[in-house]
Each structure stands twice: as C-alpha cells, then as structure tokens.
C-alpha cells in the first residue's frame, strides 16, 4: 500500500513541471506589463544638460519710422483726454439703465459699485467705448450703452 504506481508518479511529475512552467510565464508576463518607474529607462536617445545659447543676429540699420502729423482736431482731442482724467469733468451724463462701475475699462475687472438707472454722473472721457465717470465720489469705467450722449 505504501507504493505509488508508476502512472501516478508520472502524472505528479507532469503536474509539477506544468506548475513550474506557469510560474515562469507569470513572472515573465509580470515584467512585461507592470511599470516600475523606480529605475530610469534607457530609450536609446542621448540627452544633455549642457546649455546651448540661442543664436542672435544684429543689424546696424536703424528702422525707419514715419510719423503722421496730427491734425488740429486730433491734437485737441488728445489734449482734452489728457486733461479729463486728471482734471475737471467735461460735463454730466445720465445713466439710462443699471450698470457696473469698474476700476479698469473691461468687464473682467472688479465691480466697484452699481450705478442705478437715472443717476447723474460726471463724465471725463471715452476710452474704447468705456466712459470714465464719477458717481458718488467714486471714479471708474462704465460701458457707454448705459448712458446718454456725452457733452461735446
């Protein structure tokens, strides 16, 4: 009873061999699919940390500028705009609908306050469709569509 038949011994040997083969295949597959980033990978390309400055060229030719002479109307408008922000208001305008007062001439800047419909503001200048106005002692920019026409 203690003896094992040669057929059973053969089956056990085949199963042990098959188990060893499966373990070896699993280890090989694991090395293919599991990413181990702890070691630097060799990619076949060489890199350098040496600084290579960009090449610049200079010319001795001075650029030619053409200046347009301002007409008297343009000069007056420039003088008026320069004096408006720092000096006195040009006149008064009425707000036709509620509008935000901004510190800069764009809608993405902060809202300082809301100017209500019917409010009278001091008008200083027009900057690309944004009126520089003063409302209740606070100066800022508001979009022109919400005001009556500014004084000439």
Image (tube, grey):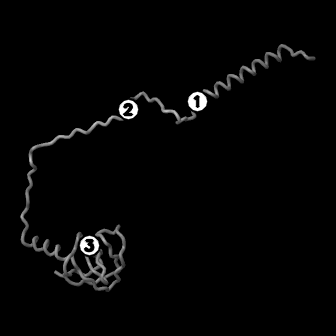
Farthest residue in the top direction?
A: 6
Q: Is residue 64 above or below residue 97?
A: above
Q: Is residue 22 above or below residue 90?
A: above
Residue under numbered circle 2: 47
- Disc 3 packing (10 Å; few <14; some 14–19; many ≥20): some
- Disc 1 packing (10 Å; few <14; some 14–19; many ≥20): few
Q: Quadrant of the N terminus?
A: top right
Report x, y in % for residue 46: 38, 29
Q: Which callout, 2 or 3, points to the residue nearer the camera?
A: 2
Relative horizontal placement of residue 150, taking residue 111 as reference (left or right)? left
First of labels 3, 1 by sequence position: 1
Quarter location, residue 74: bottom left
Report x, y in % for residue 110: 36, 70
Relative horizontal placement of residue 43, taking residue 21 as reference (left or right)? left
First of labels 1, 2 by sequence position: 1
First of labels 2, 3 by sequence position: 2
Q: Which callout, 3 or 1, points to the residue nearer the camera?
A: 1
Could you say which disc has been placed on residue 31 in the image?
1
Residue under numbered circle 3: 130
């Amino acid at each position: 009873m203690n003896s094992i038949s040669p057929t059973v011994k053969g089956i056990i040997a085949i199963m042990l061999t098959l188990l060893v083969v499966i373990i070896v295949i699993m280890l090989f597959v694991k090395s293919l699919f599991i990413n181990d980033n702890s070691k630097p990978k060799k990619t076949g390309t060489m890199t350098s940390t040496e600084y290579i400055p960009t090449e610049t060229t200079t010319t001795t030719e001075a650029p030619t500028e053409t200046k347009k002479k301002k007409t008297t109307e343009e000069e007056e408008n420039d003088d008026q705009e320069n004096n408006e922000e720092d000096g006195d208001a040009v006149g008064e305008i009425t707000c036709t609908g509620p509008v935000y007062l901004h510190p800069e001439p764009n809608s993405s800047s902060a809202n300082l306050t809301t100017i209500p419909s019917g409010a009278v503001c001091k008008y200083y200048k027009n900057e690309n469709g944004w009126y520089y106005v003063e409302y209740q002692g606070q100066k800022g920019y508001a979009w022109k569509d919400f005001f009556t026409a500014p004084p000439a």
